[in-house]
Amino acid sequence: NAGVTQTPKFQVLKTGQSMTLQCAQDMNHNSMYWYRQDPGMGLRLIYYSASEGTTDKGEVPNGYNVSRLNKREFSLRLESAAPSQTSVYFCASSFQSRGYTFGSGTRLTVV
Amino acid sequence: AQTVTQSQPEMSVQEAETVTLSCTYDTSESNYYLFWYKQPPSRQMILVIRQEAYKQQNATENRFSVNFQKAAKSFSLKISDSQLGDTAMYFCAFTPLTGTASKLTFGTGTRLQVTL
């Protein structure tokens, strides 16, 4: 099925550990995004990639890095996880402004 | 910077009744899109309805309709004939048409409970 695939769906990390969240889309969308969702705060933009080869910071980029590996894939890396990064992470892609497709989310717990 | 405000953290409605969720936004842009997303317990983000700012006609999708007031920067969602499956978090979101990437700005959400 066409869409956005995120892996893993759940993850528990210890403080200081690193990990990469993977995201891939098969809709030939130019733009891709990483959001985090925290209770009472909606979804906030971490990083985005307007097109292959470009990445930019969003609202809450500290503690994260991203890589736009190719047009399909956009990964999010936590180099040294902190409890404040406990959240649900969503990847999304879009073609212009009309349509966004979200992945199913990754629930990350940092202990 | 754009902001989106949802002032109702929680709402409840009885099955078959009508409920309206409120959303206001602040922007200096003249061309933009507004969205309502539904997030059921499955966590999936589901597009409910979309409104282009340059269209005066309010968008409608089956039981879902919006009241878009551009001058007041208001974008409310009306759910008619509420069903148990409408129970979810609802997020209002905004994106300008400028720029090469259309970043969404979300409100904090309204949790809707549909009861028997």
Image: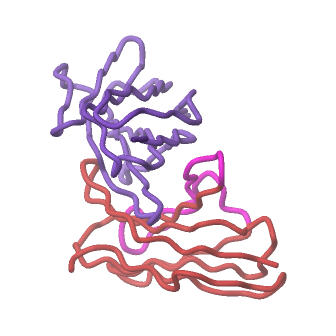
Chain colours: A red, B purple
Which residue is drawn at the image coordinates 18% and 33% (left, top)? B60
Q: Is residue A50 magenta?
A: yes
Q: Position of residue A37 (x, y in %)?
A: 59, 58
Which residue is drawn at the image coordinates 18% and 25% (left, top)? B55
Decide which of A30, B6 is in the foreground and name it.
B6
Q: Is residue A48 magenta?
A: yes
Which residue is drawn at the image coordinates 30% and 21% (left, top)? B68
Q: Quadrant of residue A79?
A: bottom right
Considering the image in quadrants, where does the N terminus of chain B appear? top right
Read off the magenta span. A39-62
Considering the image in quadrants, where does the C terminus of chain B appear? top left
Q: Quadrant of residue A31?
A: bottom left
- Measured along the vertical axis of the image, is residue A76 above or below residue B16? below
Q: Position of residue B29 (x, y in %)?
A: 40, 27
Side (left or right) of B15 relative to B107 = left
Residue extending farthest top: B71
Q: Position of residue B34 (x, y in %)?
A: 34, 36
Magenta residues, dominant SS class: loop
Side (left or right) of B2 relative to A40 = left
Q: Position of residue B20 (x, y in %)?
A: 38, 26
Side (left or right) of B13 relative to B67 = right
- Measured along the vertical axis of the image, is residue B42 above or below residue A72? above
Which residue is drawn at the image coordinates 17% and 39% (left, top)? B61
Residue extending farthest front: B116
- Measured along the vertical axis of the image, is residue A79 above or below residue B100? below
- Measured along the vertical axis of the image, is residue A26 above or below residue B12? below
Mark count: 0
